[in-house]
Image (spheres, rainbow, N blue to C red):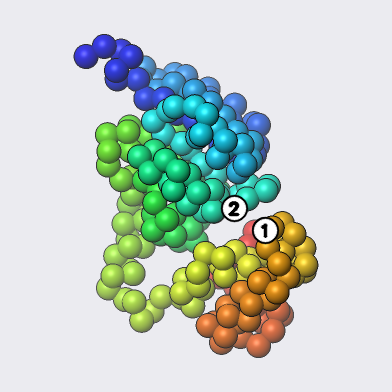
Amino acid sequence: MSREQTTIHVAIADDHAIVREGLKRILSDTRDIRVKGEAANGHDAIKLCRDETFDILLLDISMPDKNGIEVLKQIKKERPELAILMFSGHPEEHYAIRSLKAGASGYVNKQTTPKDLIFAIRQVAAGLKYISPSLVQELANHIDADHLIPLHKTLSDREYQTLTMIASGKAVSVIAKELSLSVKTISEYRSRLIFKMKLKNNAELTHYAIKNHLIE
């Protein structure tokens, strides 16, 4: 088999230039992985996937214009065959399972070692899912103890996103603008998540988010 056939072409979507440069340096040292494109926000990531051909997209969750989970869902609608490896600073227990359910091929925390990142890319390129040992345990906990799942994990992706943004101090009108949704829609998300989590107001919501390390 020729080198061209075995080369894994990767695109990187992350809003921090220093992260993109770091990833390119790490991957340039490998014999079989080449970076073919990059994007600095969600909109550009979607456009990149429409315009270019590559094997794997490394996609950050925290984008300035569009949540990574939403970007993931949009890209999978348009290019269901594309393998997407979520690459995030958020702990696995916050977003990994949500990412896998939305169609991701794996989830890598930004604290992982270069060796593990390269292994994850090769694993996904082979058509497999990448699941870290800690995520395996998290999945096992979901299977064996559904009744013990924290309340925030019962929320939809939009409800969870609204929760973290409110807990970060953002007003409903600001959230609506950032997510390109109406104030009424965000207010409905807020009402639903407060009901599901048995909370009374934003103060209790924020306290819950801080206590459960949902916000930085």
Residue annotated with mark 2: 67
Q: Looking at the rendering, which quadrant does residue 200 occupy?
A: bottom right
Q: Residue at x 44, y 48 (%)?
A: 77
Q: Residue at x 54, y 53 (%)?
A: 70
Q: Is residue 21 above or below residue 68?
A: above
Res 145 → quadrant: bottom left
Q: Give the number of the disc on residue 133.
A: none
What is the residue that sits farthest to the top in this orientation?
2
Q: Nearer the viewer, residue 192 or 167?
A: 192
Q: Is residue 71 visible?
A: yes
Q: Residue at x 36, y 62 (%)?
A: 138
Out of 102 and 167, give the one closest to the viewer: 102
Task: Measuring from the top left, give residue 31's x and y in whole percent.
Answer: 36, 17
Q: Quadrant of the C terminus?
A: bottom right
What residue sits right under mark 1 in the picture?
179
How far apart marks 2 and 1 lie (CA) works out to: 8 Å
Q: Are marks 2 and 1 in contact (CB under 8 Å)?
A: yes
Left or right of 63: which side holds 74?
Answer: left
Nearest the eye: 3 or 25: 3
Badge 2, how many Cα within 10 Å: few under 14, some, many 20+? Answer: some
Q: Secondary structure at mark 2?
A: loop
Where does the image place residue 181, in percent across and percent down from the top left?
Answer: 68, 63
> Can I make out residue 113 in this image?
no
User: x and y percent of residue 23 in the render?
Assistant: 53, 29
Residue 66, percent from left and from top: 63, 50
Please identify, in this view, whether the residue under mark 2 or under mark 1 is nearer the observer. 1
The picture quadrant where one finds residue 54 is top left
Specify the quadrant that holds the N terminus: top left
Mark 1 residue element? helix
Please name the residue shown 66% across and 82% down the image: 204
Q: Mark 1 or mark 2, which is nearer the start of the sequence?
A: 2
Q: Amino acid at mark 1?
A: Leu
